[in-house]
Image: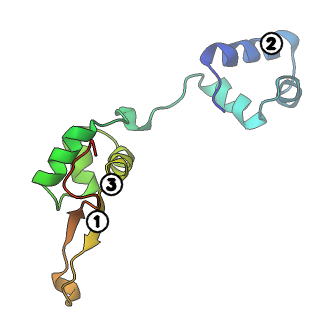
Amino acid sequence: MSYPVEVRRHILAVRLKEGLTYEQTAARFGVGIASLTRWSKRLERKTPEGRPRKIALEKLDEHVRAHPDATLDERAAHFSVTRNAVFEALRKIGVTYKKSPAPSQGRRKKAAYFPRGDRGAGG
């Protein structure tokens, strides 16, 4: 569970004001000791790599159709988002990557596969 910064600040202020240990504070407020020690070092949550985590599904769908063999990292760089954001967005629009049925392992290529037909992101 993520606590707002104001709550974190209040809990740490009570700890300092009353001279409580981390164990006593954790028991009193029902939070973990590790959380208290982490909050004492940094109150705000860290964001992954400082980049956005959401991506426009319509634009991603267009990009997949234009560049079906692009990797997750290439798509993440194109949209300036995290790799996981691209992965989750691809999952939402129903795009998976399948190997072609070519028998030779060396000649197999990954390509985008749209299981729901050619309906795009809105379908």
Q: CA distance from mark 1 to mark 2?
A: 53 Å
Q: On the image, numbered disc 1 is attached to which residue?
A: 97
- What is the residue that sits farthest to the bottom in this orientation? 103
Which residue is pictured at 30% across the width and 39% down the height?
A: 81
SS at mark 3?
Answer: loop
Q: Which mark is nearer the camera, 3 or 1?
A: 3
Q: CA distance from mark 2 to mark 3?
A: 49 Å
Are the two marked residues, 3 and 1, in contact with CB atoms closer than 8 angstroms? no
Residue type at mark 3 is Gly
Viewer-proximal residue among 106 and 66: 66
SS at mark 1?
Answer: strand
Q: Is residue 97 above or below residue 122?
A: below
Q: Position of residue 24 (x, y in %)?
A: 89, 26
Q: On the image, numbered disc 3 is attached to which residue?
A: 94
Residue 106 figure quarter: bottom left
Which residue is pictured at 30% across the width and 37% down the height?
A: 55
Q: Is residue 66 above or below residue 96?
A: above
Residue type at mark 2 is Val
Q: Position of residue 39 (x, y in %)?
A: 66, 26
**Label total for image:** 3
Q: On the image, numbered disc 2 is attached to which residue?
A: 14
Q: Is residue 104 above or below residue 8?
A: below
Are the two marked residues, 1 and 2, in contact with CB atoms closer than 8 angstroms? no
Q: Is tag 1's residue or tag 2's residue first in the polypeptide sequence?
A: 2
